[in-house]
Amino acid sequence: MQDMIIPELQSENVENVLKEMVKFLKKKNKITKEKELYEKLIQREKLGSTAIGEGVAIPHCKMKGIRNPIVMLAVSKKNVDFRSLDGKPSHVFFLVVSSPDNPTVNLQILASIAHLVRKSSSLVKKILNAKNTGDVLDIVTEEEEKLNG
């Protein structure tokens, strides 16, 4: 999972953040249809922002040809306007891509991330202060363990 983290996004808006994350997945050989994935993510954002507040966005979509769900995390020290419902900038992005054949898995992943964000008030602050991808992963794991007892 540590290799699925972008420790510092360069982009500052929805479109470029999504492009940067999709390019990262392509470079990691997690996807082959870069353009298709980007377009699906943009279409999803047009339905309504995936920024859930508290500095977090969960861009997601379903795409044919995805066997196992792809989950990645990206961090931005910049104030990214992801059109969040609370009007605040987003700094932490959980990208989820899953198969349309298994909608339940997709919903479980999204629900787990949203639950983690809502229950861990210091998650974003801790992630922004992390020194490297290993620290980011440790923080997320630690916060998950606190929730799951």
Image (tube, rainbow, N blue to C red):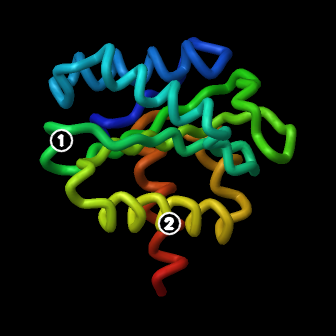
44 in relation to 98, above or below: above
Give 21 or 129, whichever is nearer the viewer.
Answer: 21
- Residue 111: % across, % down: 50, 66
Separation of disc 1 and disc 2 at Cα? 20 Å
- Residue 15: % across, % down: 57, 16
114 in relation to 45, above or below: below
Residue at 45% from the left image edge and 16% from the top image edge: 20
Q: Going by the image, does 24 lie left or right of 51?
A: left
Task: Give the residue type that dot 2 points to.
Answer: Ala
Residue at 70% from the left image edge and 30% from the top image edge: 82
- Residue 47: % across, % down: 61, 38
Number of callouts in the render? 2
- Residue 21: % across, % down: 42, 24
Q: Residue furthest bottom?
A: 149
Helix, strand or loop for disc 2:
helix
Q: Residue furthest right?
A: 87
Which residue was labeled with disc 1? 66
Label 1 packing within 10 angstroms: few (<14), some (14-19), many (20+): some
Which residue was labeled with disc 2? 111
133 in relation to 17, above or below: below
Residue at 14% from the left image edge and 37% from the top image edge: 65
Residue at 70% from the left image edge and 35% from the top image edge: 90
Label 1 vs 2, first from the N-terminus: 1
Label 2 packing within 10 angstroms: few (<14), some (14-19), many (20+): few
Q: Going by the image, does 63 lie left or right of 87?
A: left
Task: Give the residue type that dot 1 points to.
Answer: Ile
Q: Which quadrant holds residue 120?
A: bottom right
- Residue 104 visible, this angle: yes
